[in-house]
Amino acid sequence: MLEAAPVASSAVPPAQLSLRQVVTDKSTCGPSLFLCSIFLLQQFTGVNSVMFYSAPVLKPLLPNLAGAIGLGVTLVNALTTVVAIFLVDVSTHNLAFQLGSCGAKLGEASTPTKSNAR
């Protein structure tokens, strides 16, 4: 597993870059475009609040994985949105309703319930 390098207490904070510098610098352009594409995917999937709060909520529970889980949820949401768009285009509404109902039943069946035994 990758470990973060220790940060010296006397470290100087990095200088802020202008938008032009971020876009023209080869070392910052790629990561910036990647982040912008993630934000764009979040806009299309409609899960902005989940994405915004996922890392702070998961950080106390899984400090090393919170960011990766948030990114994974974003990618899964984007993938399911794209699949749903093509599914609706090529199928009837009845088929989409049936598939959605089956998915809901599978989710319900896989959710553990509290036993009523005394």
Image (cartoon, rainbow, N blue to C red):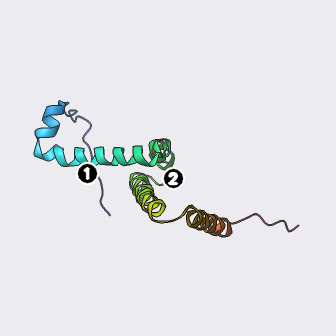
Q: Measured along the vertical axis of the image, is residue 91 above or below residue 54?
A: below
Disc 2, SS: loop
Amino acid at pointer 2: Leu
Residue 107 in picture, x, y percent from top left: 62, 65
Identify the residue shown where x is 16% and y is 37%: 22
Identify the residue shown where x is 22% and y is 36%: 11
Marks 1/2 in contact by CB < 8 Å: the verdict is no
Toward which corner of the image does residue 69 lie, by quadrant? bottom left
Q: Which mark is residue 42?
A: none
Q: Measured along the vertical axis of the image, is residue 99 above or below residue 30?
A: below
Disc 1, SS: loop
Front label number (1 vs 2):
2
Identify the residue shown where x is 20% and y is 33%: 12
Sequence-first tag of 1 and 2: 1
Q: CA distance from mark 1 to mark 2?
A: 22 Å
Image position of 82 (left or right of 26): right
Depth check, front residue: 63 or 47: 47
Toward which corner of the image does residue 7 lie, by quadrant? top left
Instruction: Categorize mark 2 by other alpha carbons within 10 Å: few (<14), some (14-19), many (20+).
Output: few
Residue 53 in picture, x, y percent from top left: 48, 42
**Which image quarter is the C terminus in?**
bottom right
Q: Is residue 17 visible?
A: no
Depth check, front residue: 104 or 24: 104
Residue 83 in picture, x, y percent from top left: 43, 62
Image position of 11 (left or right of 66): left
Instruction: Categorize mark 1 by other alpha carbons within 10 Å: few (<14), some (14-19), many (20+).
Output: few
Residue 105 in picture, x, y percent from top left: 66, 67
**Mark 2 highlights which residue?**
61
**Mark 1 highlights which residue?**
5
Amino acid at pointer 1: Ala
Depth check, front residue: 107 or 53: 107
Q: Measured along the vertical axis of the image, is residue 57 above or below residue 114?
A: above
